[in-house]
Image: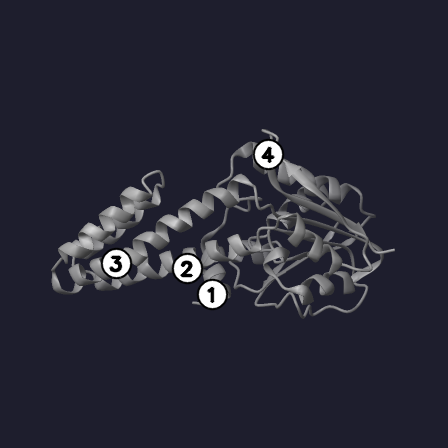
């Protein structure tokens, strides 16, 4: 499954419009406030482009702060109706933006552009107007969200490697359980017992396997594999200081600076990157 397909599955059902789905409200508030401040710095009816916009959380926050802004978003994935209503166009490559040079007063991205290669970062600069602004929030290698999902991914990969999906398929299709696989899966679950997914995923698969529904088992497997693809991509996208510096160089001639965006507990939520095209 491609990364774009994995994200299309996610955004098709993510309708909360929140800045970091599943995060505590206090963290959501910090993120939303960063976009409110960015919106308030813009001239009347300024044009804004959100890159890798996903469900449109940034556009939603900025519209709430400044209804006069002209807001657009793009994402490589197929996005749902809620995001489309906010101005997000799906199926658009961030490395080949369908806009002319000097089109936008502000280019934004939240937990998005760091998933993209150098071409996308340079495109974000190309479409900026002279004196245009750039604001990004990127995954921080040491953030709680990245750490949590690293552990969740490890648990899912361990169960998959132990044979969880084969075990469920065999039960659904033939009504038999391989005791060796049962033992292997149980060991993987025990090794990652602090992760809720070691209860949730086997329970969902087991329900439909015992009902002899191989179609439902296959559908749950596809969703789990899509989630693992997204979590792998998240770990690859999370930036330490060295990788962040490499990406800031891709923004030339924008002189960009970055600092940790701290949550209520002082720990980093992400990197806050700001710059202006001189």
- The answer to the question of whether label 2 and label 4 lie on touching residues, with beta carbons closer than 8 A, is no
Where disc 2 sits, the SS reads helix
Residue at 57% across / 68% down in the picture? 91
| Lower position in the chain sequence, tag 2 or tag 4 | 2
Above or below residue 134? Residue 6 is below
Q: How many marks?
A: 4
Where disc 3 sits, the SS reads loop
Q: State the CA–CA distance, disc 1 to disc 4.
A: 32 Å
Please name the residue that numbered disc 2 is placed on: 226
| Lower position in the chain sequence, tag 1 or tag 2 | 1
Please name the residue that numbered disc 1 is placed on: 5
Circle on res. 267: 4
Q: Residues within 10 Å of mark 1 (few under 14, many from 20)?
A: some
| Lower position in the chain sequence, tag 3 or tag 1 | 1
Q: State the CA–CA distance, disc 3 to disc 2.
A: 17 Å
The percent position of residue 226, horizontal first and vertical second, equals: 41, 59
- The answer to the question of whether label 1 and label 4 lie on touching residues, with beta carbons closer than 8 A, is no
- The answer to the question of whether label 1 and label 2 lie on touching residues, with beta carbons closer than 8 A, is yes
Q: Residues within 10 Å of mark 3 (few under 14, many from 20)?
A: some
Please state which of residues 14 and 239 is positioned toward the viewer in this rendering.
Answer: 239
Residue at 61% across / 67% down in the picture? 92
The percent position of residue 163, horizontal first and vertical second, equals: 25, 58
């Amino acid at each position: 499954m491609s990364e774009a397909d994995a994200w299309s599955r996610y955004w098709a059902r993510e309708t909360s419009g929140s800045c970091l789905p599943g995060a505590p409200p206090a963290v959501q508030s910090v993120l939303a406030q960063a976009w409110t401040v960015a919106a308030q710095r813009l001239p009347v009816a300024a044009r804004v482009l959100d890159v890798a916009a996903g469900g449109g959380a940034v556009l939603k926050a900025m519209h709430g702060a400044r209804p006069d802004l002209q807001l657009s978003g793009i994402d490589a994935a197929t996005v749902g109706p809620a995001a489309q209503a906010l101005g997000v166009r799906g199926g658009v490559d961030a490395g080949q933006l369908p806009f002319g040079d000097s089109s936008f007063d502000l280019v934004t991205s939240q937990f998005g552009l760091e998933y993209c290669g150098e071409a996308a970062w340079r495109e974000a600069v190309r479409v900026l107007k002279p004196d245009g602004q750039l604001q990004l929030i990127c995954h921080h290698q040491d953030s709680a969200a990245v750490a949590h999902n690293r552990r969740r991914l490890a648990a899912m990969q361990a169960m998959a490697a132990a044979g969880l999906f084969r075990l469920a398929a065999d039960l659904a299709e033939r009504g038999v359980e391989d005791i060796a696989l049962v033992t292997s899966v149980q060991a993987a679950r025990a090794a990652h017992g602090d992760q809720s997914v070691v209860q949730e995923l086997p329970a969902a698969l087991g329900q439909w396997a015992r009902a002899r529904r191989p179609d439902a088992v296959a559908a749950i497997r596809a969703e789990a594999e899509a989630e693992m693809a997204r979590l792998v991509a998240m770990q690859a996208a999370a930036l330490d200081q060295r990788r962040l510096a490499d990406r800031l160089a891709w923004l030339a001639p924008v002189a960009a600076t970055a600092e940790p965006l701290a949550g209520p507990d002082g720990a980093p939520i992400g990197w806050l990157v700001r710059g202006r095209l001189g």
